[in-house]
Amino acid sequence: MICIIIVAGHGAKLEQEILRDESGQFTDLINVPKALLPAAIQSNASSGSNWKFSDDQRILNCWWDLLKSRQQFKEVYLVTNADKYKHYERWATANEFPVPNIVNDGSTNAENSIGAIAALELTIRSKNINDDILVVAGDMIFDQNFSIEQLLDYFKHKKGDLAIYYDLEENKSTEQRGIIEIDSSSGRIVKFLEKPKPEETASRLACPVFYCLCKSTLPYISKYTDLYREPKDRSFGCFMSWLVNEGHTLYGMKLPSQFQLIGKIDLSEYTSWIQSSIKRNEEPALKPITVRTYARVGLIGNPSDGFNGKTISLTIGDFWAEVTIKPSTKLKLNLHPLNDPTEFGSLSDLYGISRREGYLGGLRLLQATCKKFYEYCSSNGIALARKNFSLSYETNIPRQVGLAGSSAIISSTFKCLMKFFNLTENDIPKPKQPQFVLNVEEEELHITAGLQDRVIQIYEGLVYMDFSEELINRQGHGNYIPMEINDLPPLWLAYVSDPSDSGKIHSTVKERWRGGDEEVIKGMKDFAEITDQARDAIETKNTNQLLELMNANFDLRKKLYTEKALGEKNMRMISIGRKYGSSAKFCGSGGAVVGLCLDEKKKYEMIQEFQSEGFVVCDLKPYDGATKGSDKIEREL
């Protein structure tokens, strides 16, 4: 790949203000080309003394440090003008940049400038370039907190032209930038607007001169310069807008950096940006971020979430998993002393812990989530800031009883990474986040699962979910509708203390469904109908009907899966609940049941029998994320 750095503009405004300045601070900057101005200063340089700086503080040096790896680029070219050529020749000699790779466009001032896109065309033609190219404006100040490798990997992955963009600062006008509108599902830029007025677009996604272009696109550059001869029409923004309007495929990738184009700014804007670098460097280290995700119960409809059906699910405040992320020098995943044991009292102790807890703790969940997060961002045009972290986790969710303990740890890790790297729902839309969590489990950890658990742990509260095939195919996700959690009657939860006999609840139902088994297909439709009826019962507070529907939900599950597949202990919990007139159904895959009992006296007797047989039982505490919110939990922690 070839890199071309454009520094051919004429920054008359900034140069003239530096020349006219009477403070004496900028004497050393007189007649210095824009790209050779300082990108940062020491803190004492803003106190009235001259702006002295070393070579490695120049704007162009920042770009050269980022780009000069010969493993990424076989050649790097610098395109300048006749007026400043000698300055860049001297800079090249001092910085081991090959002087023959400097291209002179012949212009001496703004009036005879040929335009940035024409300067690019001149370089391609004069150097006989027939390769993919990376082109950047060398007079842009930026924070070097992104990976150029991740950007180039995305370009290779998309196999199409790529424009870099960032979130425009609040105090900046769209009329000073190229602004894009992007299709988040494909990553394709659907509009490229050169310096639009605020009323012309709601987008705040700004494009600096920072593009990857395929070699197949290079002929379009010559075509454009033939069509448009005026320098004002030969900006990169005008060219990219023309490309998009012609139907050319152009992808976008978001960088975490801000970019300051100094071509047309005045001295006050320039010094303000430079002085802000002092504040950025003096900012205290980021504080630890802790995110808590709650256990869930499938209230109605499960297991049809994996069969294009409908469900209603609920987060509960009784049990949770939380993950803490802290800035660190190296990326580190911390072992949990209980869930990731590496030391044991004896061989007998190892045997007992392994029999009860299994071999796989939470560390693999953290690692798989981090791996998938980087992969997702790299594949979807999100460049991550270059900063490391440590991760640790804590959880009180009972293991292997179907309360979504694993997905709670993964969801908390995912939310931590989102916050640590300053990503929002604009970067990863909320309806797509459950699918990310599911992909971690299915693709990285080979855990059989459905979307329901991940949806409720992302959305929180009480949520009605429709996973119909038509919806999934059309929009890439189901419909997730929050419900009023206060409409729920009191619920109880029981679970096994030793989950070793939870049964192989998934049985062959999935295979039968995929094979078109009529009984299974009808059963999943019946689950969906029960869910719709339960939604009405909750909203009308028809508790008796909800109780009957919860029982009907389990009876249908038992018919499809058989008692043997559901497991002896699971069936015993159902039996105890039914004995006292309560509803009782699985919370998830087995190991825990949720119920609704209308008679307080019978409920008390039911609890005693559960406890006498070694089961754990408690009243549920619904957690309404819409009211309290995870952010509040983080602040409290």
Image (cartoon, helix red, strand yellow):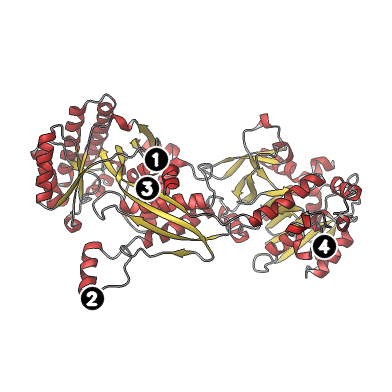
The answer to whether residue 531 is left or right of residue 335 is left
**What residue is disc 2 on?**
346
**What residue is disc 4 on?**
102
The kind of residue tagged 2 is Ser
Q: Which mark is residue 459?
A: 1
Q: Residue at x 27, y 32 (%)?
A: 488
Q: Secondary structure at mark 4?
A: strand
Q: Earlier in the sequence, mark 1 or mark 4?
A: 4
Residue 470 visible here? yes
**What residue is disc 3 on?**
293
Residue 517, compared with residue 72, is above or below; it is above
Distance of mark 1 from mark 4, alpha carbons? 55 Å
Q: Earlier in the sequence, mark 3 or mark 2?
A: 3
The kind of residue tagged 1 is Tyr
* Circle 2 residues within 10 Å: few <14, some 14–19, many ≥20: few
Residue 504, compared with residue 555, is above or below; it is below
- Locate residue 245: give its quadrant: top right
Residue 336, compared with residue 559, is above or below; it is below
Nearer to us: label 1 or label 3: 3
Distance of mark 4 from mark 2, alpha carbons? 70 Å
Q: Position of residue 621 (x, y in %)?
A: 28, 40
Q: Position of residue 234 (x, y in %)?
A: 79, 44
Q: Earlier in the sequence, mark 4 or mark 3?
A: 4
Distance of mark 3 from mark 2, alpha carbons? 34 Å
Nearer to us: label 1 or label 2: 2
Q: Residue at x 22, y 37 (%)?
A: 491
Q: Nearer the viewer, residue 245 or 79?
A: 79
